[in-house]
Amino acid sequence: MKFGRFKKDDKIFYGTVEGAYVREISGDIFSKYTILSNPVSLKEVEILAPCMPSKIIAVGLNYRSHAEEVKMELPEEPILFLKPSTAVIGPEQHILYPAMSRRVDYEGELGVVLGRECRSVNIEQAPDYVLGYTCFNDVTARDLQKKDKQWTRAKGFDTFAPMGPFIETDFDPANALIETYLNGEKKQSGSTSDLIFPVFFLVSFISQVMTLLPGDVIATGTPSGIGPMQAGDVVEVRIEGIGTLSNRVLAKQ
Ligand code: MG
């Protein structure tokens, strides 16, 4: 099943996607809901970010290949950082290149969307707390990440958390191809089977630190091949079994 968030005629609503159509949902995708009848063509709606997380918990250095390319040692425990909810944008919305930075990178990642309030769960329980999966771009001001002692500024600019297009509930996170394309050229290619800390380990680990709320998103780390984007570029994160998240970069006015 695919859940999404949409806008039509100034009305914002959740819906389920079947092929080229969306059916509106009445209620809450995280608890009780009803799928209404009349399907609407996806061409008639604006596709928004598929949920509004209270927080995004991101994981640094979670692929061996990426740790090697940035010449950092493999972590013994997941390295966590937060991206603010205000950084979220949806498919086809613009990544704004901030004037403070001279190097802004893409990081294609698998996003995990929590479905239920989650606190101190173990790995076996973790799947019950996941609603589904989406494509995520952990946009990073690389120069500021190197300059600052921690990553809040580098990772936290408005528009630095593109996600979507939909939340796929029928997805196996153990072995999926994840790729990033810049202007149609493949830049990153990895498999979630290469994650140092796999998805359900992360859900369990993070839930022992902080309460996860429905709609919160875990960005699980990026494979090797990170690189810069320029104003005018189009970046796509493609995950097998989920879909494609596409965003254009614009200079911030
Ligand atoms: Mg990242």
Image (tube, grey):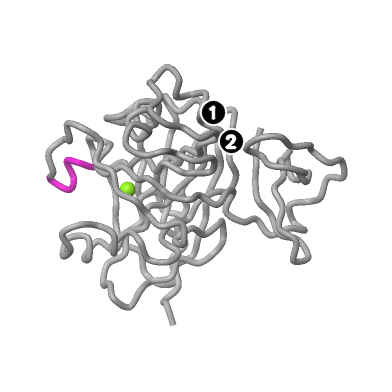
Pick the residue in front: 3 or 246. Answer: 3
| Residue 96 location, quadrant | bottom left
Task: Tell whether label 1 touches label 2 (CB within 8 Å).
Answer: yes
Residue identifier under label 1: 171
Q: Looking at the image, which residue is at 59% across and 31% down?
A: 169
Looking at the rendered structure, which numbered label has been put on residue 206? none
Residue 200 lies, in percent from the top left, at 40, 26
Q: Where is residue 130 in the image (x, y as percent from the top left)?
A: 51, 31
Q: What element carries label 2?
A: strand
Q: In which quarter of the image is residue 148?
A: bottom left
Q: Is residue 213 left or right of residue 123?
A: right
Q: Which residue lies furthest to the top in this view?
A: 124
Residue 18 versus residue 83 in the image, above or below: above
Measuring from the top left, give residue 191's x and y in whole percent.
37, 32
Task: Depth check: give the residue in front, 179 or 35.
Answer: 35
Residue 223: percent from left, percent from top: 31, 41
Q: Which residue is drawn at 46% across and 32% down?
A: 118
Q: In the drawing, what numbered circle is on residue 168? A: 2
Asked if residue 21 can be seen in this view, the reply is no
Residue 201 in magenta stretch: no
- The residue nearer to you, when weighing 42 against 100, is 100
Q: Hey, which residue is sitting farthest bottom in the picture? A: 253
- Could one spot residue 248 in this view of the protein? yes
Q: What residue type is labelled 1?
A: Phe
Task: Look at the image and say whether residue 68 sits in the magenta stretch.
Answer: yes
Q: How far apart are marks 2 and 1 (CA)?
A: 6 Å
- Residue 242: image quadrant is top right
- Quadrant for the N terminus in the image: top right
Q: Residue at x 30, y 48 (%)?
A: 81
Q: What kind of residue is marked 2?
A: Glu
Q: What range is drawn magenta here?
A: 66-71
